[in-house]
Image (cartoon, rainbow, N blue to C red):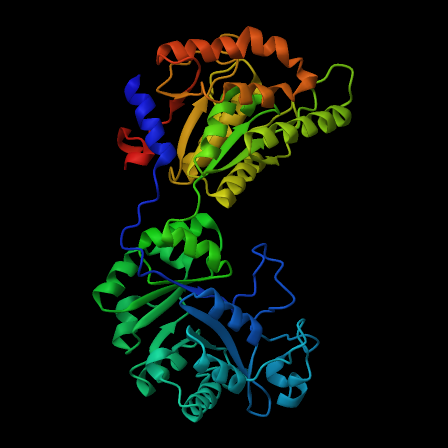
């Protein structure tokens, strides 16, 4: 029992081990436009603007990617295209007409000349993407020639810029013309050996390509090549690419990505219960201790407790119990999320599996706590099955622990592997539980949960404890000890 307690607290207070991660560099995708971190962007720093490039420079990332298109009269502008503001296809418009388009911050669509002048003054690496040119579908070289001339005109140090393109011909020509420049192919269709044979010393592939061919990262490094990956925004995907050992990560979330690389992103715990009050009564003390240890903690409720108040409609009960759960989370310091199942009518089917999978992939937790599957309450069993399935589908990417609820009446055959001493926070836990007024909580605490806490405390010689069963991973090992 002492070993279980010790191992559990190692999980609590461990810090992400950073091994050879310092060299992984962050590239802001189209500049640091997503400055508020919620994808809606910021009107003051629109994508591919001078302002978003300046924001990336101020942030201090390794580089900033930007897109270059050639207008109908052979001039170069910076925008993703083909649409820009009110124009349907930037390549079919004149430079003058494109420049009349005003971005959300009042800037005109920038020219490449403006961007290169800014890049020379900045501290970050410009990552210049040459967009495919409809005028030369085979080679896309007219735009490349114009870009090459512009780089020469501005006397850009070619060892301090990266050129990327979906056009293999552009990459081949850039590698030939600028041997000191890092050139990366975006297309994802060539092996490292094939690119190397063409003189291209870098690849910049979508993360799904490297998921299918993780061995390409190691092979590219054997050849002395660089590996960039785009566009990586979810925490789980970022962590996976970091683990692969890529050289650069292009992302719309540069702050988040840098924290993951540095190991400074707080660890994340999800507590997933079938109803409001399940997480608080089962492991409210653990939640409080995790929060105090600097973790991000989120309570996820499978339902809103729609069937949980006698004499109330589902709508009335859901409103009351949702408010109670939110108030309880304020005490434990947890965020909260509600899924869309109905109390007493929970389901296990393809749609519900996908809902749970999406939730956990988006949250990318380090540890998840949920119901023990042997339980007299069907909703508890459903919740446990859905979480376990996600754990398997995710490649056992997080630690999984099961909690108990009213053992003997609901949870059955519960033989703990790990304990948490909650003596110091038991009063706060009970305060959170008591916010669930509709559940007549005082008798439940007195007759069940307090008794359980004291009994589990006796097992580890403390005043009060919460108990868990650790899910064993591949090869019979706990995931955290791989």
Q: Residue 369 location, x and y as percent?
A: 46, 28
Q: Residue 266 location, x and y as percent?
A: 44, 43
Q: Residue furthest front?
A: 424
Instruction: Choose top left, top right, bottom left or bottom right for residue 359.
Output: top right
Q: Does residue 110 appear in the picture of this structure?
A: yes
Residue occupying image coordinates x 52% and y 68%: 55
320 displayed left or right of 395:
right
Q: Residue 460 location, x and y as percent?
A: 35, 14
Q: Residue 390 location, x and y as percent?
A: 46, 36
150 displayed left or right of 223:
right
Residue occupying image coordinates x 71% and y 27%: 318
Quadrant where the N terminus is found in the figure:
top left
Residue occupying image coordinates x 34% and y 81%: 172
For the residue pair 292 and 469, the one nearer the viewer reads as 292
258 displayed left or right of 38:
left
For the residue pair 395 and 363, the one nearer the viewer reads as 363
Tell me if residue 20 comes above or below residue 224 in the rendering: above
């Amino acid at each position: 029992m002492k070993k279980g307690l010790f191992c559990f607290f190692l999980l609590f207070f461990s810090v992400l081990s950073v091994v050879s991660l310092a060299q992984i560099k962050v590239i802001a995708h189209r500049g640091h436009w997503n400055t508020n971190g919620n994808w809606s962007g910021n009107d003051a720093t629109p994508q591919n603007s001078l302002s978003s490039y300046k924001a990336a420079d101020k942030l201090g990332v390794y580089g900033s990617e930007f897109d270059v298109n050639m207008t109908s009269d052979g001039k170069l502008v910076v925008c993703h295209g083909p649409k820009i503001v009110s124009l349907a296809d930037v390549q079919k418009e004149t430079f003058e007409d494109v420049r009349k388009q005003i971005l959300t911050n009042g800037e005109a669509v920038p020219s490449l000349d403006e961007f290169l002048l800014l890049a020379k003054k900045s501290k970050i690496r410009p990552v210049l993407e040459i967009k495919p040119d409809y005028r030369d579908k085979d080679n896309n070289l007219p735009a490349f020639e114009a870009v090459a001339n512009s780089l020469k005109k501005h006397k850009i140090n070619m060892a301090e810029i990266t050129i990327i393109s979906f056009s293999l011909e552009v990459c081949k020509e850039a590698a030939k013309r600028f041997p000191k420049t890092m050139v990366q192919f975006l297309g994802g269709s060539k092996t490292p050996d094939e690119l190397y044979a063409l003189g291209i010393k870098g690849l910049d592939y979508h993360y799904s390509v490297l998921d299918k061919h993780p061995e390409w990262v190691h092979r590219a490094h054997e050849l002395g090549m660089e590996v960039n990956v785009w566009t990586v925004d979810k925490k789980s995907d970022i962590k996976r690419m970091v683990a692969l050992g890529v050289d650069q990560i292009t992302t719309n979330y540069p702050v988040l990505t840098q924290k993951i690389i540095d190991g400074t992103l707080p660890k994340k715990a999800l507590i997933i219960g079938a109803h409001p009050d399940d997480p608080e009564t089962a492991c409210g003390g653990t939640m409080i201790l995790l929060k105090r240890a600097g973790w991000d903690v989120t309570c996820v409720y499978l339902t809103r407790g729609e069937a949980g108040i006698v004499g109330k409609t589902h709508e009335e009960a859901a409103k009351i119990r949702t408010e109670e759960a939110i108030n309880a989370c304020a005490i434990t310091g947890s965020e909260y999320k509600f899924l869309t199942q109905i109390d007493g009518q929970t389901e296990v089917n393809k749609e519900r599996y996908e809902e749970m999978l999406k939730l956990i992939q988006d949250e990318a937790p380090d540890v998840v706590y949920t119901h023990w599957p042997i339980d007299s309450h069907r909703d508890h069993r459903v919740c446990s099955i859905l979480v376990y399935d996600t754990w398997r589908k995710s490649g056992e990417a997080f630690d999984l622990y099961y909690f108990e609820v009213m053992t003997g009446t609901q949870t059955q055959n519960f033989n703990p592997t790990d304990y948490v001493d909650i003596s110091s926070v038991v009063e706060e836990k009970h305060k959170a539980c008591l916010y669930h007024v509709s559940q007549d909580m005082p008798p439940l605490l007195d007759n069940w949960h307090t008794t359980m806490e004291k009994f589990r405390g006796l097992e580890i010689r403390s005043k009060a404890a919460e108990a868990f069963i650790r899910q064993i991973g591949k090869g019979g090992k706990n995931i955290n000890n791989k």
